[in-house]
Amino acid sequence: MNPKTNNNTDLSNDSSIRLPGPDWASPSLYSGMQSFMGRPYYRDLSNPDVDIVVSGVPYDLATTGRSGARFGPQGIRAATYNLSWEEERWPYNFNVFEKLGVIDWGDVEFTPGDCVHFVEALESHADKVLEADKTMLTLGGDHYITLPLLRAHARKFGPMALIHFDAHTDIDEQGGFYDHGTMFHTALEEGLLIPEKSIQIGIRTWLDRAEHPYHVIDAAEANDMPVAEISQKIRDVVGETQAYLTFDIDCLDPAYAPGTGTPVCGGLTTDRAMKLIRGLKGLNIVGMDVAEVAPAYDHADITSLAGATLALEMLYLQANNRMS
């Protein structure tokens, strides 16, 4: 079966489970099981037509603010049904699913409340996907999910650049080990990242620039600088280094993303964030995630929609890069 063209691919070879495809002319966009963009639930990684594996990670035990990001994958998937009718997403002139074979793996399974098993399960899942030479797009979950993902990606690719959109630096040395504010300190200590090739965009909480290991474009700069100038800065820092792209939804201003655990005023607009993702064209991005969507604090699903839209932009970015 070809995930690029077949909208009824089986889940784990169970022919009783079917999904509607992304065809905008289908009788109902909202019928059946909700997957990311209506892509097939599918788990055969040996299929050469599979390029991108979308996985949900319903975990939020590392939050220091409001919990609820465990429902993020569910909210993002549901919101994609507002996007799946458009065959060629504006401003592109192609349908991403005609260029990439994208499947929805479903959610990573782990013992509830067991952080150790969660880390083991996510790393094992990521190892399996990457060993099959597939690219991961992961839906959180709180931002701690990025640390196990970085470990798996580093085993595959070696130390990487980090392109990190967030209101917070997440390099706290004082938090607990399972803490969504410590991952990028831990990742640096473990040798997963190349600090001089890494950059954080949208930061607007405490930051000691003199001691900070990564490049930073803070929120005030990111809101005032032309998008093209920001994109060029990112490109200059990352260069040709293999990079991991992570987007914490609280990079957006709470006006555009209220449904998150630690909202901070003064963030980016959704429009600017989308343009910045598009501006990463040509960079060697080997893994991607969207984190911290917490639908319980949302209004009219705007945060879930923002997360879904940014995730879709990441797919178009991958398609653009592979077409270049």
Image (cartoon, rainbow, N blue to C red):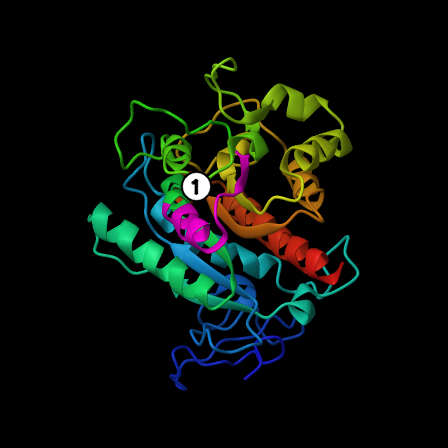
Q: Which residue is drawn at 45% across and 38% down?
A: 259
Q: Is mark 1 on a helix, strand or loop?
A: loop
Q: Is residue 158 magenta?
A: yes
Q: Where is residue 15 shown, x and y percent of the image?
A: 41, 86
- Above or below, 302 against 74 in this view is above
Residue 209 seen in the current view: yes
Q: Does the magenta stretch include residue 246?
A: no
Residue tagged 1: 192
- Above or below, 281 against 12 in this view is above
Q: Where is residue 214 shown, x and y percent of the image?
A: 53, 27
Q: Residue at x 46, y 27 (%)?
A: 169
The amino acid on which the numbered mark 1 sits, given as a three-letter code, is Leu
- In this rendered view, identify the residue nearer to me: 71 or 144: 144
Q: Where is residue 75 shown, x and y percent of the image?
A: 45, 52
Residue 300 seen in the current view: no
Left or right of residue 226: residue 26: left
Which stretch did the figure color magenta? 148-165
